Image: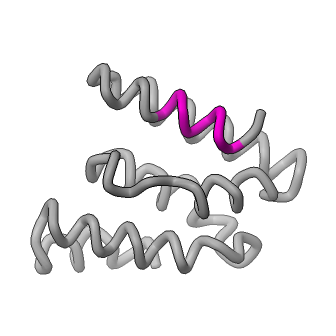
Amino acid sequence: MRAVDVLTEIYRLHSEGRTDAALDLIFTTIEADLKGRGGSMTNDLLVQVDVDRLDEDILVGLLIATYAARSLLKERPHFLERARGRLRLQLGEAVTISVLEDLT
């Protein structure tokens, strides 16, 4: 599956209020990509994701799903900074610092 296809489905599920289904898709897709392709699709996804279209549950889910492979995912630090900016707007500075404490 291509990153653009995964993101299209994540955006659709999110817009329908189906956060659990979106998170399931994130975790299963990223896990399969890391095992099968070494994270190439995941890197593409992290570059292409529009953080302004997602809420804190999905953004944190993406960070959790990619945390164990953070050293393999060259695009994760850039995504982390974009997600941090979005989370600050959604949650405020203090909560964002707390939420991201163990995910950086």
At x 23% / y 79%, what residue is drawn? 97
Q: Give the range drawn in magenta.
A: 3-10
Left/right of residue 62 with respect to residue 69 in the rendered view: left
Q: In which quarter of the image is the N terminus?
A: top right
Q: Which residue is drawn at 48% across and 33% down?
A: 10
Against 27, is 69 above or below? below
Q: Does the magenta stretch include residue 9?
A: yes
Q: How is the image coloured?
A: one colour
Q: In which quarter of the image is residue 83?
A: bottom left
> Residue 48: percent from the left, percent from the top?
58, 56
**Residue 77 on image: x %, y %:** 55, 79
Q: Is residue 27 above or below residue 38?
A: above
Residue 42: image quadrant is bottom right
Where is residue 8? Give x, y as percent. Answer: 54, 32
Q: Residue at x 15, y 60 (%)?
A: 90
Instruction: Give the left or right position of residue 19, taking residue 8 as reference.
Output: left
Viewer-proximal residue, 44 or 92?
44
> Residue 3 in the image: x percent, y percent?
68, 44
Q: Nearer the viewer, residue 40 or 38?
A: 40
Q: In this view, does 102 lie above or below 6?
A: below
